[in-house]
Image: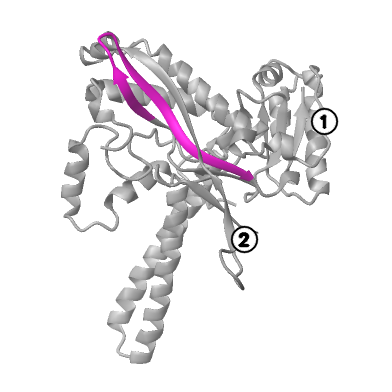
Amino acid sequence: MNHLMRSHAPITDIAWSQLDAEGRERLVPALGARKLVDFSGPLGWGYSATNLGRVSDVKAPGENLQARQRKVLPLVELRAPFAISRHELLDADRGAIDLDLAGLDAAARRIAVAENIAVFHGWPAAGIDGIASATTHEPITLGTAYASYPGHVAKAVETLLEAGVSGPYGLALGPQEYTGVVETTEHGGLVVLDHLRQILGGPIVWAPGLEGAVVLSLRGGDFLFESGEDLSLGYSHHDADNAYLYLEESFSFRITTPEAAVALTA
Amino acid sequence: MTDTAGLQEPESRLSPATADRHRAIASLQEELEAIDRYDQRVDATSDAALASVMAHNRDEEKEHAAMLLEWLRRHDAVLERDLRTYLFTSAPVTEIEAEVEAKVPGDSGAPGTAGTFGVGSLKGESL
């Protein structure tokens, strides 16, 4: 058994299987940031910090000594608790395949949104810079004229090319921007989403938690997500009515090339 | 470009991540096949110097294969979980499988993978 304590839960194998399947199904569509940045790991729950390869001077505890201390970026633990009815879980063993897992669905959304926010907008308390806030390029204003988005995205790609940042390029869209893009056609009937794909040469992702949009290079080595424990489902406690579970992960995120992205503001 | 001859589905329907994994898998196949060929030729030749050169080359292919396998591990969360379960163990392999299947789901004990959804990298996937 590990720290997730799953074997202590009053949950059968069949119910665990449904919870695991539902959790993954809800998480993957919302994890927009992971579809664009480099991912390494998972390195395990016991992995605590990302090596930054740098040192700072520290006072030595004696004469004629030099001392330096390694710099690291500690991983952050992120947990989304939720409750599931025990009666509902027992119905899984009776063959029910339409369990009410609303608590799990909401938790999956919360933790995916938090991961996207950390990557795109940063998490200062955790020492994480976000792609949209760290970029050195001037932001491009999008507005709500969705038919003009291809022009804005083409401008962002040109900015990256001028900075010597090669492609392919990807586009992350906040929920409002995504909805606007998929509903809009340009003059001549070309779907905006298809036009954007032609400009970018890379994926377009839906990223709840992102405000506005971000164009970034997918060449690799610029945006590094390091996973300790990848998204997991654990057990906290239970009472007569509910099992109290949680989604959890540990990670760090760092940017080595801030100029490899352009922010597009709403 | 992708080795389209080895693709089972139209290239236009593949995500960039799947296309890259295909490239790595095809390369790994080629390295393993080269190891097998060199092994046989080392056995077959009666020239000791030639056998030495080919044994050296064969062992370099093993390094290449290991590098490709590691890349695949980093880009396939399920493969990562299974490699952590089976590699560098000493128990009979089929016993390890039986032990894993007998455990509570998610409690495989493998570091960083027990109870996870196995999401891993999604880089290159759309929407």
Q: Nearer the viewer, residue A3 or A137?
A: A3
Q: Nearer the viewer, residue B18 or B66?
A: B66
**Marked residue chain, label 2:** A
Q: Which residues lie in the magenta part? A: A233-254
Q: Residue tagged by mark 2?
A: A59
Looking at the image, can residue A32 be seen? Answer: no
Dot 1 or dot 2: first in sequence order is 2
Tell me, yes or no, whether the highlighted magenta stretch contains residue A241: yes
Q: Position of B78 compared to A13: left or right?
A: right
Q: Nearer the viewer, residue A7 or A194?
A: A7
Q: Quadrant of the C terminus of chain A?
A: top right
Q: Which mark is residue A85?
A: none
Task: Check contact, mark 1 vs mark 2: CB within 8 A.
Answer: no
Asked if B116 appears above or below B93 in the picture, the reply is above
At which x and y percent is residue A202? 65, 39
At which x and y percent is residue A226? 52, 44
Inspect the image, locate mark 2, and give the three-letter code of the amino acid beneath it: Lys
Inspect the image, locate mark 1, and give the three-letter code of the amino acid beneath it: Ile
Task: Give the number of the mark in front: 1 or 2.
Answer: 2
Q: Tell me what residue is drawn at x 45 percent, y 61 percent.
A: B67
Tell me, yes or no, whether the highlighted magenta stretch contains residue B50: no
Q: Tell me what residue is drawn at x 30 percent, y 34 percent.
A: B106
Q: Quadrant of residue A86?
A: top left
Asked if A199 appears above or below B40 in the picture, the reply is above
Q: Quadrant of the N terminus of chain A?
A: top left
Q: Which mark is residue A140?
A: 1
Q: Tell me what residue is drawn at x 34 percent, y 22 percent.
A: A19
At which x and y percent is residue A97? 30, 13
Callout 1 secondary element: strand
Asked if A105 appears above or below B89 in the picture, the reply is above
